Structures are given as structure tokens and as C-alpha cells.
Amino acid sequence: MIHFSSSVSSLRASEIRDLMSLANKPDMILFSGGMPDNDLFPLEEVDAIYNRLSTKEKQIAMQYGPTHGIPPLLDSLSDYLKKKGLPVNDNKILITTGSLQAINILAHAFIDPGDIVLVENPCFIGAISAFRSYQANIVSIPLTPAGIDLEALEQTLDTLTTPPKMLYLTPNFHNPAGTLYHRDTKLKLIELMRNRSIPVLEDDAYSELYFHEEDKIHLETLKAMNPEGLDICYTGSFSKILGPGLRLGWMLVPEEIYKKCELIKQSIDACSPSFTQMIAHKFLESGMEQEYLKRIRPEYALRAETMSRLLRELLPEGCSFTEPRGGFYIWIKLPDSLDATDILKTAIAKGVVFVSGKTFDPHGIANNHIRLSYCNSSVAKINEGIPLVVDAIRHHQQQVVR
Ligand SMILES: Cc1ncc(COP(=O)(O)O)c(C=O)c1O
């Protein structure tokens, strides 16, 4: 008999992972993964960056680096974040091994077993797993099309007898819901959270992937608003703006929080890969990231538009979704009588795969949504796959009617 720690005993492989193993046929159409398309990676730019590195830079790239990040990347990232309006001078940057590590480190810093963490419902599965691994008591607040339900949040804050340790949010292009918080929601949220001593973890993995210039007003981050009386722990990532294989992200946090997080990171991996940090530094320093983003935004917008148009035309009555304005996902609400996992099984048999809603329910129950990713499929694959998804939904809808 193996005796695992209580913190890992509750961790389970998700049912989705098991189902996904059925879905690895070579011609399967994948609307499941939240990864960028291989064909869109800036391979030539990365080749050129590496080939132009000096011997000294290559040596830095091959060596261990400081826990908080290699100095050139800290400088170029600092400039990049300043341009996004982030309060870099009043805070500290910690480079992490993907932004999921930043979330995990912050969870480690704040959560004791049984502590309450507030999250949106639905919520990014990686964050749910991180909070669970520290035995958090996860309390969820519904998400509306304009952002977190502020009334529900206020009510929860008023009724909880023990104050939460943290509020975790993804205001810009939510995973899975695709939501972009309205600026007004962000401003009201700040007022609601001010002076409560509850840090807000603002997860900002997708804000560069907007489709409409006019949305920029809503994209300003809570962190950039730099509110007084509220600690905002901001996390970001190179995964969607360069490549997840680099495994690089960051947190921008007040100094006191940074100091603890740096100690935690030391014990996890000492430092993130210097090699990819050097590549990411050159990518930012040369301004290539702006050129690259200009190239990929319209491509993702086209995929989102294609998927949305087909869904508008084909989805049966009772299903609904909000057209995404950026990011990677469409979140379809099904009639309550339908179960997304049943539909997923049928869809896999038809040759298409997506993720069922309960994966993103912090309580693992609500299963009347499906998440479709358009990021990793060509327009041709979207045209081919969406009718199959719709067929699977219709099939189960007819069974309910019978
Ligand atoms: C909302 C959100 N946050 C964080 C991450 C983690 O990204 P990474 O660890 O690759 O930086 C993801 C990845 O899909 C995500 O969707």
C-alpha cells in the first residue's frame, strides 16, 4: 500500500484526459487544445535570433541563471510591460517556467489547507488544479458576458465567515468562456475589493490576442489601473505570443509578495531555462513580437469568425454562445437536458473532439457547456469539423425529445 500525502491524494486524472486518449486518431479534428497552431510559430525569427547570438550570449543561455530571471530579459520584459501601462517601477518581476508556475507559486504563497480561494465559474483548469493541490476550499462566482458577477461576488464576500485568501480572475479573453470584462466591471471590481486585504491574482495570458482595436479600452489590466488598497498579482506568458514550448511566463507583484515567491521558486527549479529566456529577450528587444502579433491576430480572428458563423447557421435552438473578440475559445451553452460528455463521445466517433464543460467547473459538476478551440485548426478543418459537432449535439437533442 502506497501512502501519498493528503495534498496529492485528492488529485485525479480528469475523465477528459481518458477520453482524449480515444481521440488520438491521426485524422481527428481537434477543437480541444488551447495551444497555438504549429504552422503559425515564428520559426524563421527564432532561427535568426539563435544564429545571431554572440558566444557570450550563448554561454549565458547554456548556464543556470538567477532565480528571478536573466538580467537582459528582465530589462526587455520590463520595457514591454511598461508599454502596456503596467506599474513596473512599483513592483517586481519574477520570470517563471510558464505562467502556470506563477499561479502555482502564488497559490503556494497564500493557501493553507482549507483556505478559501474565490474563482470565476467557469475557470481555467490549470488554476483549479493548482489551488486544489494546496487543498484550497474553492468558492466560485458566476461569470456574466461583461465579466465576473459583481453582485454575486459582493454577496459571497458579505456572507463568508472566514475571509478568502485570494481572488483568481482572467479578465481578458477568458479560458474557457472567451469573455472580455467590460471596463466598467473592472472599475467596479476594484472598488469592491479595495481595502479588504484579499490579493487578486490577475491571469493575463491572452490580452495580446485581441481582434478589434476598439476593444483596447476594455483590455487595460487591473494591474495597470494600479489601484491603492488592493494587491494585484499579475501573471503573463510567452506561450501565446511566442510559443508554449519555451515554458516562460512571469509575475509582476508587490515587493513583499515577490520576496516570498522567489524563495518558493528557488526550491522548485532554481531558475527558468536561460536558453529560452535569451530567445524571448531577443524577440522582445528587436520588436519582432509586435510584427508577429500583427501577423497572427488576423489569422485567429478569421478562424474565430469562421467558427462563429457556422455555429450561428447550424446550432439548433436552445444552444447559445457569445462571439469571441479575442483569445482562443468559443463556449457554447447547451440546453440543460443535454450532457456535454455524452455529446463528446458521439463527436469523437464522428472524428472531432472538444472539451466538455465540467472540466472547467471548479466543483466538477455543471456539464451543459462545451469549449471549442479555434486556435489550432485551419479554416478548412473548422468548416469540416463544426457540422460534425452540431450533428453530435442534434443526435443527443433528438434522444431527449424521444
Ligand atoms: C488562462 C490561462 N492561464 C494560464 C495558462 C498557462 O500558460 P503557460 O503556463 O503556458 O504560460 C493558460 C494556458 O493555456 C491559460 O489558458
Image (cartoon, rainbow, N blue to C red):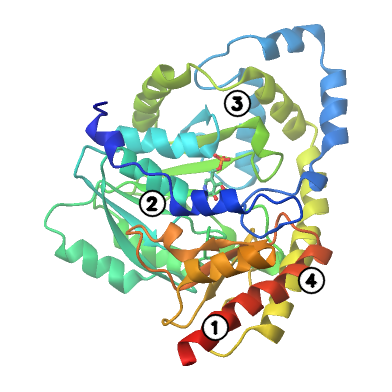
**Which callout, 2 or 4, points to the residue nearer the camera?**
4
Mark 3 and mark 1 in contact? Answer it, CB < 8 Å.
Answer: no
CA neighbours of label 3 inside 10 A, class few (<14), some (14 to 19), many (20+)? some
Q: Amino acid at mark 2?
A: Tyr
- Can the viewer see residue 222? no
Tell me where residue 222 appears, x and y as whole percent. 47, 54
Tell me the SS state at disc 1.
Answer: loop
In front: 135, or 291? 135
Q: Which residue is mark 4?
A: 383
Give the label on residue 319, or none. Answer: 1
Q: Is residue 128 left or right of residue 234?
A: left
- Can the viewer see residue 286? yes
Q: Is ligand 1 closer than 8 angstroms to the Cβ of mark 4?
A: no
Instruction: Residue at 66%, 34% (x, y): give it.
Output: 245
In front: 390, or 89? 390
Q: Is ligand 1 closer than 8 angstroms to the Cβ of mark 2?
A: no
**Which callout, 3 or 1, points to the residue nearer the camera?**
1
In front: 377, or 150? 377
Structural distance between the alpha carbons of marks 2 and 4: 35 Å
Instruction: Residue at 64%, 41% (x, y): give it.
Output: 239
Tell me the SS state at disc 4.
Answer: helix
Closer to the chain start, of discs 3 and 2, is: 3
Q: Which residue is mark 3?
A: 74
Tell me the SS state at disc 3.
Answer: helix
Closer to the chain start, of discs 2 and 1, is: 2
Q: Which residue is mark 2?
A: 168
Closer to the chain start, of discs 4 and 1, is: 1
